[in-house]
Each structure stands twice: as structure tokens, then as C-alpha cells.
Amino acid sequence: MEGQLLGDRYRLVRQLGEGGMGEVWEARDEKLDRQVAVKVISLLAGREGRGDEARARFLREARITGRLQHPYIVSVHDLGESDTQRGTVPFLVMELVRGEGLDVKLREGSVDLAEAARWGAQICDALGDAHAHGIMHRDIKPSNILVTPSGTVKVLDFGVARAADPYATADRLTQTGFIVGTPPYMAPEQARGHPEPRSDLYALGCLLFELVTGRLPFQAPDSVGYLTAHLSQQPPAPSSVAAGVPEAWDAVLLRLLRKDPAERYASAADAAQALRRLADAPEPVPAATAPLTKAWPSSSPGGPSPRKPVAPRSWIAIAIWLLITLVAATVTAANIDGAEDGRDVASGAGAVAIATVGLIIWFAVQASGGSSRDGRP
Ligand code: ATP
Ligand code: MG
């Protein structure tokens, strides 16, 4: 599709990503002479009348969510349909955000607690604004949150999951009863087909749980497993899953993850307030010994292998190695008297070699222990 002109105006430059509904491209708006992002909903592609209704519905719904204007919500500039080899395809033109998705940040493992709390609060601000306009997100998950270079979030795909549901009909639009969303992050009531604004808070709870502990609240082999867990299992306390997560986080995350929406925060604004308190809280005592920056297994299959930072205990091992090396060097230097230099140097070198082998074994054991930690499938 590279080089293709959509809507007589948007020239596709390079593909930025691909999701369940289609692809996202960086494009040049030739009319306004600026870069934009274009989401091509290939899921709704069709020929000669096929899917006309679904596409019309998509445009109608996307027009509503496109009215949202908020610093933490990606702006929608335009909507359109284009004739491609695959038939008529609807597309959505957005502000191009230079930044990284939380899915990428998760894979890199470079998330600290205060940062996660700040992002969480900003996502709540975005949700609060949308909820006030009668719009639910329905698909809060890491790939739908971008973080700009200045460190603020941009929430993507507001309401798009529902708008792009190819199985919905105009008739069913007026009813609840069809399920859209992403199972690992889906609130129990949404899994039952009755999403409400606080379902977004539940999904945010799953996302923040994953950010601070490195794993989702529930592990399951497939979508049915996730939905069953959301419906019937109690999530563990985050502090019991990852060392270094303060107990203050347990209360906030477990409240976001309550099965009954009425037991969650009453509004996104209330959740934002709780998260800002966590962001402003002084660093917990264990943080002095355990780094807040953690690495964990990739949350998406086939992703790059996780980076493992040097843990404090490793520094102790390095310090012991340095001490042995220094003592060996000092003793060897002191013993050099001309008579038995060869043996003195050999025993000094031997001590350093044994310490080095010990250090290598230590790191090997640490590395194998870390890689056996389990992520989600
Ligand atoms: P889904 O189809 O369920 O939303 P997804 O979120 O993984 O799946 P897309 O929404 O298609 O996939 O987005 C793919 C990727 O494109 C995102 O992960 C994001 O990195 C990038 N992207 C999306 N919108 C923009 C944008 N406005 N600016 C910059 N990058 C974007
Ligand atoms: Mg998306």
C-alpha cells in the first residue's frame, strides 16, 4: 500500500503498526502539507455493497468519538473511505504521535512506579473527559496508549473497537449484548456484554497491574480462559507478585479490579486522584535496595527477549570479586622478593581466576533464574 493516495489527499509513507482491525500508516496530508497517522480499517473492507452498512456505521460512530478534544486523547482529523484492490475501505486520519506505545515500554521493562502512576492518572483524565461526553473506550490496553517524548500519554482508539465491530448491525447498536474488547483486559460485565464507563477503569487496573508487576492479574492460555478468570477469580495483590511494589498500590489496583463496578472508584476522576497520590508518595523503603526499574518477559508472543537489569545482589558479587582481586594483587606484590616470584604470581593469578569463575557462575545462575519467570501466553 506504500505510496497509495487515500481520499485524494493522504499519501501513505510507511507502516507504523498492525492490529486486529487493520494497519496504521504514517502519511502525508498533501492538502495541509503535514504528517498524519492513518488507520486503515481493512477488517471492514468489502466490494459491491458488501459491508456497506457496517462501514456506514463505522463512520457514524467514529464521527462521534472524533469530537473528543483533550490533551491526553489523540485527535482525529478526518474520516473517509477509499477504493483499494481489496474494495472499499474506511480509514481514520489522526494526529501523528511521535512516541512509544506502552506495549513497547512493557517489552523494554523500563517502567518505574511513579511514572506508571502518572500515566495511569493521565489515562483517567482522558477517560473522565470521554465518559462526560457519553463515550466509553472499551479497549484500554498497552498498544492503545502512546507516551510522547515529553512523558505525557495519548490514548488511541476511543470507541473504535465498537465502531469497527463487523458483526454489529444498526439494530444491535441500540442494544447491549455484543462483546468487543481485548480478553486479557476485559471487565466481567463487559465480558457479559454489558460494558459501562467503569469497565474502562477495570481495564486500566489490568494495564497498571501489568506495568508495575510485569504480568497480568490473570494468566490464561486463551480468550475463554481470560474471560473465565475475570468473571470468577480473585486477582492477587500486586505486592505479592513483584517485590518492591508498595502495599499502597495493592489498595488502588485491587479496587480498580473489583468484579462489581459499583465497588470500583465511582468515577475516572476519583481513580485519577488515588493514582496522583501514589505518584506523589515518597519512594518506599524497599526501593533503596530493590530498583523500581524492572524487566520482565515480553507480554506479546514472539516479542524480543526481556532485558534483565543488574540486581543489587549482583553488585555484592562484583564487590567480592574486586576485593579478592585487590587482596591477591597486594599479597602478590608484597611477596615479590626475587626468590619465588613465579610461584607468587601464579598463586595470585590462581586466586583471581577462581574468583572470576565464581562470578561467571553467579551471573549464569541469576540469568537462568530470571528467564524461567513466566509471562502471559
Ligand atoms: P487494535 O486493532 O486492537 O487496536 P493494536 O492497538 O495493537 O490493535 P493498532 O490500533 O492498529 O493496533 O495500532 C498499531 C500501532 O500503530 C500502535 O501500536 C501504535 O504504535 C501505532 N499507532 C497507532 N496510532 C498512532 C498514531 N496516531 N500515531 C503514531 N502511532 C500510532
Ligand atoms: Mg489500537
Image (cartoon, rainbow, N blue to C red):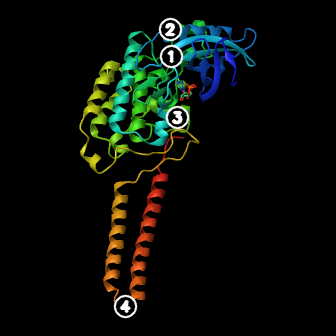
Q: Which mark is residue 279?
A: none
Q: Tell me the SS state at disc 3.
A: helix
Between the residue at mark 1 and the residue at mark 2, the CA separation in whole angstroms equals 9 Å
- Quadrant where the N terminus is found in the figure: top right
Q: Where's residue 216, x and y in %?
A: 45, 37
Residue denoted by label 3: 225
Q: Amino acid at mark 2?
A: Ile
Residue 267 in the figure: left or right of residue 84? left
Q: Where is residue 4 shown, x and y percent of the image?
A: 70, 20
Looking at this view, is 189 or 363 the one in front? 363
How would you rate the neighbour count of disc 2 (Cα within 10 Å): few for under 14, some for 14-19, many for 20 or more?
some
Is residue 54 among the parts visible in the rendering? no
Ligand 1 within 8 Å of the CB at mark 4 = no
Question: In this figure, which residue is indicated by the disc labeled 4?
Answer: 338
* Closer to us: 160 or 34: 34
> Mark 4 is on which residue type?
Gly
Query: What amino acid does circle 3 point to?
Result: Gly
Label located before the other in sequence (3 or 2): 2
Badge 4: residue crowd in 10 Å (few <14, some 14–19, many ≥20): few
CB of mark 3 near ligand 1 (< 8 Å):
no
Q: CA distance from mark 4 to mark 1?
A: 83 Å
Question: Does the numbered disc 1 mark a residue whose Cβ is under 8 Å from ligand 1?
Answer: no
- Precedes in sequence: disc 1 or disc 3: 1
- Mark 2 lies on residue: 64
Near-viewer residue (59 or 219): 59
| Viewer-side label of 3, 4 | 4
Q: Which residue is mark 1?
A: 159
Asked if marks 4 and 1 touch (Cβ < 8 Å), the reply is: no
Q: CA distance from mark 3 to mark 4?
A: 74 Å
Residue at screen point 35% across, 76% down: 329
